[in-house]
Amino acid sequence: MNNNRNVYTFEDYKCTPDPVFAVERECLEPCPAPIVVDNGSFQCRAGWASGAAQCDRPRLVFRSAAARSRGAARSDAHVGNDIASVETLRWSLKSAFDRDAVVNFDIQELIFDYIFMHLGINTQGHVDHPVVVTEPVCNPLHCRQMMSELLFESYGVPRVAYGVDSLFSFYCNSDGAALPPTGLVVSSGYHCSHVLPVINGRLDSVNCKRVNLGGGQAASYLQRLLQLKYPANQPSLTLSRMEELLHRHSYIAPDYQQELENWRSPVFYEKEVHRVQLPFSGRTAGVCVSAEERSERRAQQLRRLQEINSRRREEKLQEDQKRLETLLSVQELLEDGSLELFHRSLVELNMDSAEELQSYIQKLSMSVEQHRLMKPETAEVEPPADEGNETETDLNEENEEPSKTTSANQPMFNMAEYHQLFVGTERLRVPEILFQPSLIGEEQMGLMETLQFVLEQYSPEQQEALVKNVFLTGGNMQYPGLKERVQRDLLAIRPFQSHFKVSLASRPALDAWFGAREWALRSPAEDQGWISRQDYEENGGEYLREHCASNTFIPMKLNKPTPAAKHTLMGKLATDTSLPDTISNDTDNDITLS
């Protein structure tokens, strides 16, 4: 094997705790600057929407998770970058998200506490800054209601604005236009991917489609593939390392089947395979041992043999003494005249006469005496006890010199290569699940099939306008070759000689925050899109003020009973004899509550 090939190593990123920043003067005067929170299911990004130079990037970027044991106090929870290594606390890691929707608001409250504390908000009991929060496409009304209740009731923010993260990214890359143009937004995150049609700057939520695939499923798929390939290294194939492999070594093949055929070639394989070194410990085989170490090992082995021989001699001496005492007790029976008991004991000892007994007693006595005489001499003279050990040491001494010559001629075994991952076709098979979910057993459409289905809902003229601005964004859209693959598949979908344009976000993972910041800078307090506390109290927590990057607000309709229905209900309650009297007495209250 050529040792000149590049061998990659795992970074094993360790998070460092975020400092508590001081609030800049520009964020307080002339009015409190908005706080922008890109609340992603994998990473959360928070910062200020201010014109100050030091506020042009998110201050906080951390994993959207908290490690909190059951029954532990809130102060004992670790949030974001306070978790140095995710793998050590993965068993207690909790997320606020179910796919892309926030459902665990206890964890979400911990995340907001972390954001406001590290941004330097030190006002007690309330936050005086407006907040811009991203939310998923077609966010359930209950989730928005709980989020508004958390921000208005727990933190006392003056106003809130909600927007879709991928639309904020589209807004950021629209070349400074007041409204994003017509286009088709394709986004992919950690849990889900979306295809969003934008018509004249507004989201067409009726034809939005979601694919339940993202970076999380890809990392799990890569972990399963490598665990099957390297069963001896399963403990080292953690999910964090799989995410690192996915981000650094994976790519999208323009033609998946043709690329697999290329990988069949040994020359192509040797050129494109990535060798990734796993951490390992232990002495490397094939390293030459010095003469001092060799003599020390031999001395240790000799001492162990001496201890074994000495222990064996002690055990044999104890057995001989015990048997000698038994024979002497039988001889005493003969001297005492107990002939019947004496003959019975001889039969038990498998002896025929008293002469045989006397001969055996003499032999045991001599053997015991010899062992007692040899015991003080063992410290000076240390011969091996049995011939097997003696011949073994002789053979080792005889074969010592030939082993040196043979080991010099044999190739040295590199232990590091045994702990290397050869990442070959996994580099393209894993990201391919975005286009072929059937690879992991998912019965749903791929990303391009979903895009084609969305296009078919529009007229040919609208389709032509949409495909002229296909925009790719999201943290899971950073694979090399993704844009070329979308262009190739779109060419196969569209009619002959039709025109289209595919563009990729300049910062696919961060443009959602930058777009929300830009929107907050352009939208004053009285502008459309902000939800004030008065709006929250009058319209409820699920209320949404629409803007260019927001969801479409569809209020919940509660069908109130008509007067005729109320009269019918009262008649039924009056004639129903199976109900208790207390129910009929409270009929008016029930009707008013409905």
Image: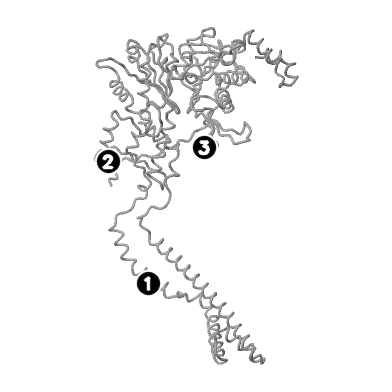
Question: Badges 3 and 1: C-beta atoms under 8 Å apart?
Answer: no
Q: Work out whether 512 lies above or below 240.
A: above
Q: Which amino acid type corresponds to the residue marked 3 in the rendered image? A: Arg
Q: Are marks 2 and 3 in contact (CB under 8 Å)?
A: no
Question: Residue at 25% across / 38% down in the picture?
Answer: 268
Q: CA distance from mark 3 to mark 1?
A: 55 Å
Q: 230 or 43, which lies in front?
A: 230
Judged from the image, the secondary structure of the residue bearing numbered disc 3 is helix
**547 over 358 or under it: above or below:** above
Residue 584 drawn at (x, y percent): 73, 16
Relative to 370, 485 lies left or right: left
Q: Quadrant of residue 21?
A: top right
Label 2 environment density (alpha carbons within 10 Å; few <14, some 14–19, many ≥20): few
Residue that badge 2 annotates: 270
Of the two numbered discs 3 and 1 on the same chain, state the one appearing first in sequence.
3
Q: Is 300 or 587 nearer to us in this picture?
A: 587
Marks 2 and 3, the one that precedes in the sequence: 3
260 or 248, which lies in front? 260
Residue, x 63% and y 85% (percent of image)? 329
| Residue occupied by mark 3 | 90
| Nearer to the camera, 311 or 329 | 329
Left or right relative to 331: residue 138: left
User: By what rule are the colours in the image chosen?
Assistant: one colour
The image's mark for residue 394 is: 1
Q: Secondary structure at mark 1?
A: helix
**In terms of sequence position, does the residue under pointer 1 or pointer 2 come before the other?**
2
